[in-house]
Amino acid sequence: MNIHEYYLLRVKSHEESKAPWDYYEVISTISGEDANIPRAESKCSLMKRS
């Protein structure tokens, strides 16, 4: 299974944006291992069936 990182983003104000598509600032990066629990530890019934 490929677990990817997750990002906490903040929307920039109009004054902070310096270029086209410059909308977000990365506040924090969370590793996939910290953001996800093993399937066996999940309490979700849908996860247990798949």
Image (cartoon, helix red, strand yellow):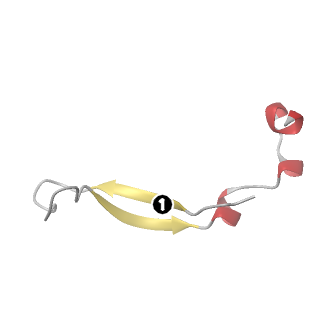
Measuring 22% from the left and 59% from the top, which residue is drawn there?
22
Measuring 10% from the left and 59% from the top, which residue is drawn there?
15
> Looking at the rendering, in which quadrant would you find the N terminus?
bottom right
Give the vertical position of 39 relative to 6 (above or below): above
Image coordinates for residue 8, horizontal then vertical, percent: 45, 58
For badge 1, the amino acid type reads Tyr
Q: Residue furthest front?
A: 1
Q: Secondary structure at mark 1?
A: strand
Q: State the residue position of label 1.
A: 7
Q: As drawn, is 23 to the left or to the right of 38? A: left
Image coordinates for residue 28, horizontal then vertical, percent: 46, 67
Foreground: 50 or 36?
50
State the count of labels.
1
Q: Estimate how packed mark 1 is, as few (under 14), some (14 to 19) or many (20 or more) residues with alpha carbons within 10 Å.
A: few
Measuring 83% from the left and 40% from the top, which residue is drawn there?
43
Image quarter of residue 34? bottom right
Give the vertical position of 6 relative to 45 (above or below): below
Image quarter of residue 50? top right
Q: As drawn, is 4 to the left or to the right of 19? A: right
Image coordinates for residue 47, horizontal then vertical, percent: 81, 38
Measuring 16% from the left and 57% from the top, which residue is drawn there?
20
Image coordinates for residue 16, horizontal then vertical, percent: 15, 62
Q: As drawn, is 46 to the left or to the right of 3? A: right
